[in-house]
Each structure stands twice: as C-alpha cells, then as structure tokens.
Image: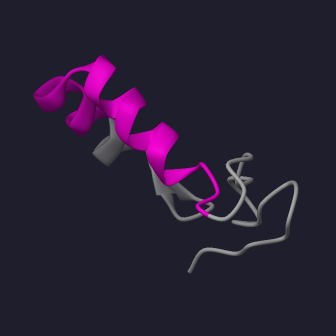
Amino acid sequence: MKRFDYNTLESAKRIKTMGIGKIIEQDKEKWTCPECGHVIHFQSKKCSNCDYTIE
C-alpha cells in the first residue's frame, strides 16, 4: 500500500535488511530541515519552522 509517497512493504523490507536503528538514523536525517534543524512534516514535506520544502 502506498500513501503519502510512502510504501509500507518497501519500508518493512528496509527494516529487515538494514535494521531499525539504521532506518531511524536515515529517516531522522531525511526529515530534519537542512535550513533550521526543525521537523519536516511527512505529508506536506514542509518544515514546521521556516517553510523549507523538499521535493
């Protein structure tokens, strides 16, 4: 199932092959704003602080 550009099955495969610790580390980097360090919202792909948007 794919929602919000997120594939649950692919995510489960990543966890199985890489381990949850590595996945958390990668996701934290992906969803942290490079401009100000705040959280990028998953659905809108926009920073909660400075409105930086990822593609």
> Where does residue 38 sit, x and y in percent of width and height?
74, 47
> Where does residue 54 sit, x and y in percent of width and height?
60, 74
Going 85% across and 54% down the picture, which residue do you hit? 48
Q: Nearer the viewer, residue 42 or 11?
A: 42
The furthest residue to the bottom: 55
> Where does residue 11 sit, x and y in percent of width and height?
35, 40
The quarter of the rendered structure image containing the C terminus is bottom right
Report the span colored magenta.
12-34
Q: Main secondary structure of the magenta part?
A: helix
In the image: residue 16, left or right of residue 5: left
Q: Nearer the viewer, residue 35 or 39?
A: 35
The furthest residue to the front: 36
Q: Disc count in the image?
A: 0
| Residue 23 shows up from this direction | yes
Asked if the stretch drawn in magenta spans residue 14, the answer is yes
Asked if the stretch drawn in magenta spans residue 39, the answer is no
In the image: residue 9, left or right of residue 13: right
30 over 15 or under it: above or below:
below
35 over 17 or under it: above or below:
below
> Where does residue 29 sit, x and y in percent of width and height?
46, 46
51 over 47 or under it: above or below:
below
| Residue 1 shows up from this direction | no
Going 41% across and 28% down the picture, which residue do you hit? 24
Name which quarter of the figure residue 19 lies in. top left
